[in-house]
Amino acid sequence: MSHCPSCGQFVGPYDTCPHCGAHLDGRTALRAIKIVAVGMIAVGFLILWLLASRAEPPLVPVGQIGATMNLAYVRLEGQVSRGPNYDSASHTLAFWLTDDTGEIYIAAYRREAQDLIATGRVPALGDQVSVAGTLRLQKDFVSLTLNAAGQLQVTKPEPSERSVAEIDPYSELDRVRLRGQVRGIREPYQGLTLIGLRDATGAIEIAVPEETLALTGALPPLASGQWIKVTGTVTFYQKTPQLTLTRVTDINPSTESGGTVALQPVSGIGPEAIGTWVGVQGFVTSIDPFSAGVKLTLDDASGEITVLLWQDLYDKLSPVTALKEGTAATVYGQVAEYRGQIELLPELPVDVQLAAALPPPEQFTTSPTVSPTVTLTPTPTTPLPLCTPPPCKKDEVYHCPDDCPGGCGTVCATPTPDTTPTPTFQVVCTPPPCKKDEVYHCPDDCPGGCGTVCATPTPTTTPPPTFQVVCTPPPCKKDEVYHCPDDCPGGCGTVCATPTLAVTPSPTPTATVSPTPIPLIPTTPMGEVNANRAGEMLTVQGQVTGTANFSAGFKFKLGDDTGQIVLLLWNDTYDAIAGIEGINIGATVKVTGEIGVYEGELQITPAGPGDVTLFVPSSGQDAPHREIGGLSAADVGMAVEIEGDVSRVEDFSHGQRVYVTDGTGEVQLLLWQNVADRLPDGEKLVAGARVRANGQVEEYKGALQVVPCLPFDVVLLTE
């Protein structure tokens, strides 16, 4: 109603006519309309807020983040692969997150970072996280900014109980718990502490970054030889596994004591044990100082073994018990071989435990009252006799008096030597001269006894010549065999004499001609090479039957008709060998080098590139060509050839991940760092390039990989 029903004038929004004063009924008040409108707007905003606060941001794989998603609010899920790092000056907390498709940088600033630290929700290496935030895309860098501390959810995986030997390349980012003995603490550079740990199966280092100390506190006091339990995340440094500590509360000293491995008899330690860690117990029978330390001979009645103490270790041994012959000792160390002799190499003073000097081991073979048991503790477990026992006979047991202040146990004192000791195992009767390998039986009335010993033949003034060239051989050609005449008095064998260059030859030569040998390095059949020849310089020739790489070099398995050996080439040697691209499966190679044994595997290591000769080059691995989409878990361990286009390249701490597609599927081409660094035309390995590669199919966290062994197993193709 816009006009007054009484006077007919226009009244507008008024309730009372301004012209005649009539009251207008049935009109809706404008005020009410305003109130209703404002209320509906408020309700609408409330509904929008409720929907927005309860709506989950979309979950996006890291590999699918593109340029059009800048400033998008998304959610990511994955595992912490690096970090966390905290900058106290800018109050910035950052870490890296990885999933099956890629890796991204996550950052929280100021209040959000302080809230995470205050509430103890800082993610650690290896933790599973779900985080929502705003994407920031720059030219070569993608990151996500955490806008609220509540948008970060951290799930800490339950650690698994492991031994050191159970940590392998597939354990990366696994959370594990180890128990072992501290072997040493060092700081290779400021900001990183490394703690050596050993258990019965091997050794590993615990990495403690300064960021861990800054966020979780200081390390508890630790010392070499102390036993600890530690929980951490498995990481790798140049393909070497290590355990990264994420919280200082995860390392706990233990009251445990004893050796890292069980004791075993010396007779059971052979060449197959080289490189392993063992423990033995016995008596010191000889002490031989040398320029770099001391060698001990340890006898446990089953056999003898040499214990090598370097000088710095020897100087640290406890002076409470003097090291002397007859001392009971328990030694833990690594088995090594030097010139065909098995040796035991302890590392720390705690690895060598000495007890009081006891009689030689043969005195205890029949006496049950004395048991040479030594436990691995910092102080000798056998108390030193303060009462001096009298001289005694073999196997005699000395009981010290009740009032002996220090106690001495049932220990037999070392007999006082006589002025004329009775000889043992000495030849008193003089055997006559005898031939090689002849056995001499001494007569029954021999007063001292001499055993079945053959005396050394008494040399005569004019010994008959043996293998001497008495007859003068004529000059001969190379490889010619000279047969001396039947009436040659001294015999000369089948020796070819070196041509004699004489200016005025005598018509009747009287001088004896000694042939000058030509230095030759013979090729040794691989079947004749064994662990006993470790340290020798040999030359072998064979065909390459297998290849492998490690962080410091490359390995080639060589074989001939008699056996196999591994050719070990360090990176610098590999780089300097002429025609190295031809050394692959199928090549024939001759190599001169030092024989060694590593983890039970025979190796030959050349001193330089000149010691490797390529006779027949390889044309590359002859692996079956496969379509990428046809690869499956059943192919793991097989060598294949693939070809396709590079979709993307990602760097990681140990090399590169190259994703290759051929229209049937996509697979990850894993290039370890030393392979990636030596890849021909490696700078052209970018998205869009076409590549052919030979490698072994492997599986990592459910994803298939093709892993080339050598740089020349990867070829960039030109269209």
Image: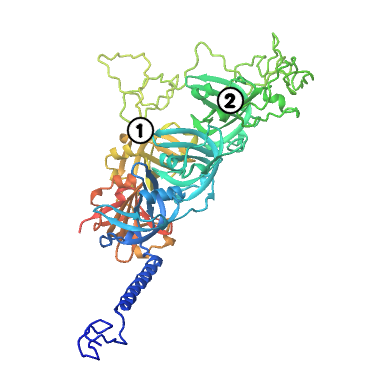
Q: Is residue 193 above or below residue 139?
A: above
Q: Is residue 239 above or below residue 31?
A: above
Q: Is residue 247 above or below residue 387?
A: below
The answer to whether residue 226 shows anywhere in this view is: yes
The x, y position of residue 179, in whole percent, is 56, 42
The x, y position of residue 438, in whole percent, is 61, 24
Label 2: which residue? 297
**Pick the front one: 646 or 210:** 210
**If you read the primary sequence from the N terminus, does the residue marked by circle 1 or circle 2 appear first?**
2
Local SS, label 2: strand
Is residue 688 shown left or right of residue 208? Answer: left
Local SS, label 1: loop
The residue drawn where x is 34% and y is 30% is 480
Three-letter residue code for mark 1: Ala
The answer to whether residue 624 shows anywhere in this view is: no
Label 1: which residue? 607
Q: Quadrant of residue 302?
A: top right
Compute the Cα span from label 1 to label 2.
33 Å
